[in-house]
Image: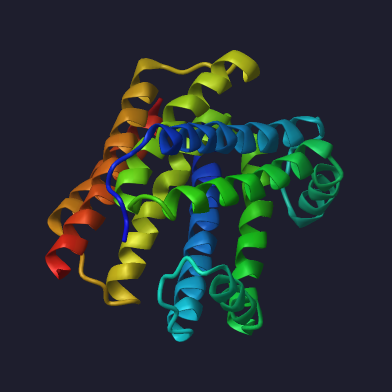
Amino acid sequence: MFKKKVTFKILLLLIASDILETTVHFLFKKSTLGSSQGQVTDLATATAFLKVVFSSPFLWTGLLTVAAVFIVWSMVLSKIDLSVAVPIASFSYILVPLVSIIFLHEQITALRWLGVFFVLAGVILVSLSSKERAEQAK
Amino acid sequence: MKQGLLVVLSMIALTSLCDTINQLFLKSTIDSLNFTPSLNIIKILKFIFQLISKPRLWLGFSFSLISLCVWLVVLSKADLNFAFSADSMHYIFIALASRFVLKEKMGTWRWLGTGLIVVGIVFVSLS
């Protein structure tokens, strides 16, 4: 019942889910930056920290975005195989570091980029192997 | 950052572990419902209502709430780009849990992919 072919519409949805996913993590990070006392060392400072974070609009916007990702992702998976969708959606492994550099002024070394590409390759292999499984089962 | 690296990595491991437990509960709840994939909206809604009426699902969700709280603490301590890559260690936990808890079969490619993720996390952590 699933089509393997990625149409232009599905590709747009996948790019949207990448961007939304990256936005989620950016917003979560933003929500923790507001509380500059953020040095969590024990349970008491942790609860104080979480109180501040859970009152941040960034966090709630982030959680709403999680819901949006879920809807977009469900739409994608109703059209194509997971093993096709995940490799394309893994683009967020590149997008998150880029957003971190541009908007959060984080620094990324060459070794870290190398690590990112290993993780990305691993995720793609894991998702492709689900296709291999499904085909063996037929 | 260097001294706190181990603390941050263990906290990321904790969120990944909680996520994995949540996935296991979700999977076992869904399996118990015998749902066959369908595009019929009424069938899907009925399935979702059945799903949210299962206490096991909420047990799983409570783990994902813990995971969110720990994740926020992680983000307050570490760079986003590091945390995001390191969080892919949930692939390792999911692989182990699928193999040993759910007794699913794992192909060579999947182990290889999981291994690459491990190497990637090591590189990301070293830098």
Among the 4 quarters of the image, the one containing residue A32:
top right
Question: In the rendered image, which quarter contains the N terminus of chain A?
Answer: bottom left
Among the 4 quarters of the image, the one containing residue A43:
bottom right
Say which residue appears at 27% left-offset and 77% top-offset: B103
Instruction: Tell which of B20 and A22 is nearer to you.
Output: A22
Instruction: For residue B1, say whether it is visible.
Output: no
Among the 4 quarters of the image, the one containing residue B4:
top right
Question: In the rendered image, which quarter contains the C terminus of chain A?
Answer: bottom left
Position of residue B22 relative to residue A20, above or below, is below
Say which residue appears at 28% left-offset and 42% top-offset: A5
Say which residue appears at 33% left-offset and 35% top-offset: A120
Instruction: Tell which of A93 and B14 is nearer to you.
Output: A93
Q: How many tags in the picture? A: 0
Q: Is residue B34 left or right of residue A69?
A: left
Q: Residue B36 location, x and y as percent?
A: 40, 77
Say which residue appears at 63% left-offset and 68% top-offset: B61
Q: Is residue B111 left or right of residue B98?
A: left
Q: Residue A13 location, x and y as percent?
A: 49, 37
Q: Residue A50 location, x and y as percent?
A: 79, 49
Position of residue B5 relative to residue A41, above or below, is above
Instruction: For residue A75, say whether it is visible.
Output: yes
Instruction: Tell which of B55 and B127 is nearer to you.
Output: B55
Q: Residue B24 location, x and y as percent?
A: 46, 71
Q: In this figure, which colouring scheme has been used for the structure?
A: rainbow
